Image: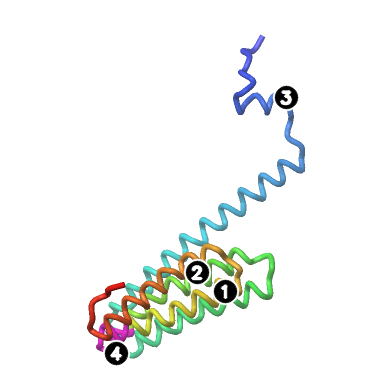
Amino acid sequence: MPPRIPPQSPAASFQTFPETPAERQARREKRDRQNINITLYVASLLLVAAAALFIGTSLPPMLRFAGVCAVTALFYGAGFVLHARVPRLKPAAVAFTGTGLALVPVTGLALFNFALHDGPAAWLITSLIGTAAYVAAAVRLESRVLVYLSLTFVASTAFSGVSILGGALVW
């Protein structure tokens, strides 16, 4: 006779209630969604790192700046288009938009290095663009996570505004 499993054990539920095909399919779909999301977010991280490395290439400075801006806008816009037109690809759309949003600070770094050699001004412009991009994404994609992440750009805008004025931040 096999050993008895205690009733509070998670394995006990599998002995008394066999999994139905619908439950099995739902579990499989959830696992597939998690795998897709993890893969998309890792790929997004690698793309952001690649954009940061692209800034250090030996291409002409304005070409590097234009390249980073184009890639940022492409990912951000592609995410919105996918989200609006292909419901099945909504996780990919959020990942694309998130990649574009994660590239905003990299674009700000490129702005400082190649176009506008004034640190506080580049910071303020990047913060304002980032705040607007995050707010637009949070509203269009209806994502709480983006709302919370947009707060970092709101704080950055406050700090950069004070930095442009050359004053200390006293609230």
Tell me how far mark 3 sits from mark 4, CA to CA: 68 Å
Q: Which residues are magenta?
A: 111-122
Of the image marks 2 and 3, the number of the one nearer the N terminus: 3
Q: Which residue is mark 4?
A: 116
Hey, which quadrant is residue 126 in on the image?
bottom left
Residue 16: numbered disc? 3
Hey, which quadrant is residue 141 in on the image?
bottom right
Q: Amino acid at mark 1?
A: Gly
Q: Amino acid at mark 3?
A: Thr
Residue beneath the point at 42% across and 64% down: 45
Tell me how far mark 1 sits from mark 4, CA to CA: 28 Å
Residue beneath the point at 57% across and 57% down: 36
Secondary structure at badge 4 equals loop
Residue 65 location, x and y as percent? 35, 86
Q: Which residue is mark 1?
A: 79
Which quarter of the image is occupied by the C terminus?
Answer: bottom left
Q: Amino acid at mark 2?
A: Gly
Residue 127 location, x and y as percent? 38, 79
Q: Amino acid at mark 4?
A: Leu
Tell me how far mark 1 sits from mark 3, CA to CA: 45 Å
Tell me how far mark 2 sits from mark 3, CA to CA: 44 Å
